[in-house]
């Protein structure tokens, strides 16, 4: 897998540069839209869940509370997962005509576009850091966010590669994934703290904990919001789990992508 990625690195960068040049090309605000959408969702959800449903965020590392900061920390992690997963399916479909004319690894445009998507994650992370600096919630545990997000990206890309090859064969997969992602979002502790679920329902708490994305989101909440250092073994597990998922997705994609041009 690593050998194949290294061998095709120039092709991957070519697709990344193409996606970077064309994304938001005809818009006035350009890459600013990559922040406008998540910030708009943040404001809406923060208002609804903190003012209407009265969801209380747990205390930050400095003892204060901020539901907006808690929510945005989870959103950064979730958006990384959901965007890479969705992008993997759409990129494979959008490059169907090119795959019919030119022979190249079908995963190259998928990974290339995913690299560009990471720019949005970096921008969101900068905004999150600025928010915590203003709130005075600063700690060395922030450095744990890097391996956590890397593990999230690997996990998302691996699942995305699996689903993209399935979607190429069965077009309904994309619509099913959209529904599942909508449900999974509410089964991940992004909008609410894990303690709220545990105090409400043991069954629901078990379901939420069984969701792999809950592990990544909870780890980010601990590191960035609560300033609690996740366990070394826990962070390693997130990285290894993400890498193994990526490896499995890459292998499955290559295994069933021989006639992908004809399917698209």
Image (cartoon, grey):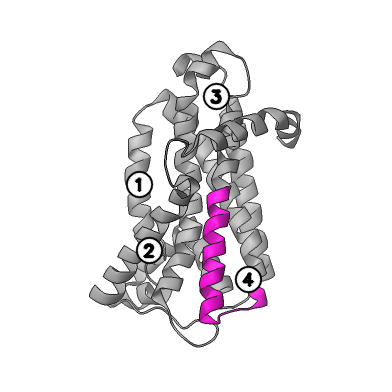
| Badge nearest the viewer, 4 or 2 | 2
Residue 259 screen position, x and y as percent: 53, 16
Point 54% across, 86% down: residue = 62
Residue that numbered label 2 is attached to: 42
Residue that numbered label 1 is attached to: 180
For residue 253, side relative to residue 2 (left or right): left
Residue 227 screen position, x and y as percent: 58, 78
N-term-proximal mark, 2 vs 3: 2
Q: Residue furthest top?
A: 101
Residue that numbered label 3 is attached to: 256
Q: CA distance from mark 4 to mark 2?
A: 21 Å
Residue 168 screen position, x and y as percent: 44, 25
| Badge nearest the viewer, 1 or 2 | 2
Q: Residue furthest left?
A: 52
Residue that numbered label 4 is attached to: 142
Q: CA distance from mark 4 to mark 3?
A: 40 Å
Residue 164 screen position, x and y as percent: 48, 32
Point 64% across, 48% down: residue = 243
N-term-proximal mark, 4 vs 1: 4
Point 56% across, 41% down: residue = 114
Q: Nearer the viewer, residue 35 or 156?
A: 35
Q: Quadrant of the C terminus?
A: top left
Q: Secondary structure at mark 3?
A: loop
Does the CB distance between marks 3 and 1 fall below 8 Å? Answer: no
Magenta-colored span: 119-141
Q: CA distance from mark 4 to mark 1?
A: 31 Å
């Amino acid at each position: 897998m690593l050998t194949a990625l290294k061998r095709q690195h120039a092709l991957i960068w070519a697709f990344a540069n193409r996606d970077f040049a064309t994304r938001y090309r005809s818009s006035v605000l350009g890459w600013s839209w990559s922040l406008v959408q998540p910030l708009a969702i943040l404001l809406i959800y923060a208002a609804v869940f903190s003012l209407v449903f009265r969801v209380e965020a747990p205390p930050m590392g400095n003892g204060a509370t901020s539901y907006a900061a808690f929510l945005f920390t989870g959103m950064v992690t979730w958006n990384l997962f959901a965007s890479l997963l969705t992008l993997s399916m759409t990129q494979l479909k959008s490059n169907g005509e090119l795959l019919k004319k030119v022979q190249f690894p079908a995963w190259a445009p998928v990974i290339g576009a995913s690299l560009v998507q990471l720019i949005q994650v970096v921008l969101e992370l900068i905004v999150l850091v600025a928010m915590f600096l203003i709130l005075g919630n600063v700690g060395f545990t922030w450095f744990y966010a890097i391996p956590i997000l890397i593990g999230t990206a690997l996990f998302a890309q691996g699942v995305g590669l699996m689903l993209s090859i399935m979607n190429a064969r069965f077009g309904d997969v994309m619509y099913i994934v959209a529904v599942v992602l909508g449900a999974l979002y509410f089964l991940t502790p992004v909008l609410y703290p894990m303690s709220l679920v545990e105090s409400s329902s043991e069954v629901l708490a078990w379901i939420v904990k069984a969701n792999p994305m809950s592990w990544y989101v909870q780890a980010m909440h601990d590191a960035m919001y609560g300033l609690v250092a996740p366990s070394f073994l826990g962070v390693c597990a997130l990285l290894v789990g993400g890498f193994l998922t990526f490896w499995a997705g890459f292998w499955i994609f290559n295994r069933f992508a021989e006639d992908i041009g004809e399917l698209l």
